[in-house]
Image (cartoon, rainbow, N blue to C red):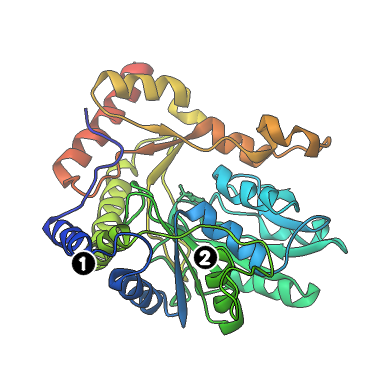
Amino acid sequence: MIPVFTLNIGEKELQNICIAVESGWVSSRGEFIKIFEKEFAKYCGTKYAVTTMNGTAALHLALVSLGIGKGDEVIVPNFTMISSALAIHYTGATPVFIDADENTCNINVSKIEDKITDKTKAIMPVHIYGHPCDMDDINKLAKKYNLKVIEDAAEAHGAEYKGKKAGSLGDIGCFSFYANKLITTGEGGMLVTNNKEIYDRVRSLRDLAFGEEQRFLHQEVGFNYRMTNMQAAIGCGQMESIDDFLKIKISNANYYNKELKEIKGIITPIEKKYVKNSYWMYVIKVGEEFGMSKDDLKKKLYEKGIDTRDFFVSMSEQPFFKHLQSDEKFPVSKKLSETGLYLPSGLNLDYKTIKYICNVIKTIKDEKTK
Ligand SMILES: *Cc1c(COP(=O)(O)O)cnc(C)c1O
């Protein structure tokens, strides 16, 4: 079976883990944490970075650090992974869903302004599958209405918007190092910012908000969202390869694009002129012209030993967000869920395998139209 993703943890990471364990610093203090944060901030072009236990925790901390909570509203794409909306829900604030843009799968920025109310405190754009959102437009709206911008860049390590790295474009950027992300620490996350106040606050909130004068006297509600030094040890090893990983993702995506171009009904991902798509996952949409539903194509690919994954199910379809539902329809998100598929996107994929996958898709279509 050709898997959707493959793990890339090497010798360097294993050596680092041994160093971390032998040093005795296995919890969240230790040198690797500091190095990983410093290197990741540098990579993103931000002043500060804070490790967290996962990407969802980074998003939650971002919101709490900005004082967002009960009675507030936060604008978020309807088409995203559950973590973005859940993080908002955890704070007691209400997520306000916006339909997607069909071409990029990102939040449709032209639909945001209508949803801004007196309660709106922030916008959380998500760079879906590695294609950056239109951040200039989002930042302009944020400025006009005095809103904060929290980027969910969990799928966009290394992606760029007008020459700047995803995550560095708003007030706070959040990343995930889950196993299938561009780089991994097993579980893990990172929050980046240029704002010293936010940085200090996030560090305190992540670490149970211990007292400054009297350690065990807590002035506010904190969280234990720390990353371990062992995970950071893996992260430091991964940082040495991040540029290579990104290059592989991009060159594989370009090769897929070339091979799939001629197949009618297979809609390949786009890359706007002023962005660098990091192609976290190589995604296609199965259009009507293909002559077969996404589900049928998925089944046939599986029979040929090619694994795939469905697109996200929209937030408006989630049972526990039922109470937020109105008569509003989200036709684009719905269509994306119905037609979208990730093809194998692992870092060890070679051109020969990609060609094979594309040929199988071609053959499936040819047989169908015969
Ligand atoms: C992976 C991901 C996250 C966070 O994931 P964790 O598993 O909590 O690290 C958040 N948002 C999006 C869009 C993601 O894809």
Residue at 27 percent across and 28 percent down: it is 306
Q: Secondary structure at mark 2?
A: loop
**Displayed quadrant of residue 248:** bottom left
Q: Amino acid at mark 2?
A: Asp
Relative to 343, 244 lies left or right = left
User: Looking at the figure, which quarter contains the C terminus?
Assistant: top left
Q: CA distance from mark 1 to mark 2?
A: 21 Å
- Residue 134 visible in the displayed image: no
Above or below: residue 105 compared with residue 67: above
**Displayed quadrant of residue 270:** bottom left
Above or below: residue 60 compared with residue 354: below
Above or below: residue 19 compared with residue 43: above
Q: Earlier in the sequence, mark 1 or mark 2?
A: 1
Residue at 53 percent across and 81 percent down: it is 194
Q: Is mark 1 within 8 Å of ligand 1?
A: no
- Residue 180 visible in the displayed image: yes
Q: Which residue is mark 2?
A: 207
Residue at 57 percent across and 58 percent down: it is 223
Q: Which residue is mark 1?
A: 23
Q: Of residues 19 and 160, which is closer to you in this image?
A: 19
Q: Residue 278's x, y, as percent?
A: 38, 60
Q: Is mark 2 within 8 Å of ligand 1?
A: no
Q: Residue 7's x, y, as percent?
A: 24, 46
Q: Residues within 10 Å of mark 1 (few under 14, many from 20)?
A: few
Q: Amino acid at mark 1?
A: Ser
Relative to 101, 192 lies left or right = left
Q: Residue 216's x, y, as percent?
A: 58, 68
Q: Secondary structure at mark 1?
A: helix
Q: Residue 175's x, y, as percent?
A: 46, 60
